[in-house]
Image (cartoon, rainbow, N blue to C red):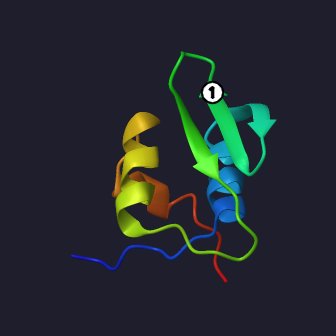
Amino acid sequence: MSRRPRMTGADVLSALSRAGVMIMRIRGSHHFVRHDDGRRTVVPVHSGEIIGPGLLQKILRDCGMSMDESGNLVPDK
């Protein structure tokens, strides 16, 4: 089993945008995102804070993606 990527909220948003998810609105630090087919979720973007593995898994599940699929979206650092 591979290690889950450590991502900030901004990293998650950029990965989701490459998957076709768009930001619909922002309320404070919470970005509400939606895909054309209706999948949607909320991504918290706090400066420099890493999103925990449980929350990352929920965001991906809400978007209909698995951790394996998300690995292809993570930019190399």
The residue that disc 1 covers is: 34
Identified at 38% across, 47% down, the residue is 58
From the viewer's side, name the closer residue of 25 and 28.
Answer: 28
Q: Which residue is farthest front?
A: 28
Q: Amino acid at mark 1?
A: Arg
From the viewer's side, name the closer residue of 25 and 21.
Answer: 25
Mark 1 crowd level (few <14, some 14–19, many ≥20, 10 Å Cα)? many
Q: x and y percent of residue 59 in the render?
A: 46, 46
Task: Classify residue 17 as left or right of residue 42.
Answer: right
Is any atom of residue 41 visible in this view? yes
Q: x and y percent of residue 16 in the render?
A: 62, 46
Q: Which residue is farthest top?
A: 37
Image vertical order of residue 14 relative to residue 11, above or below: above
Task: Classify residue 47 as left or right of residue 68.
Answer: right
Give the quadrant of residue 57.
Answer: bottom left
Q: x and y percent of residue 8 in the render?
A: 63, 69
Identified at 64% across, 78% down, the residue is 76
At mark 1, the secondary structure is: strand
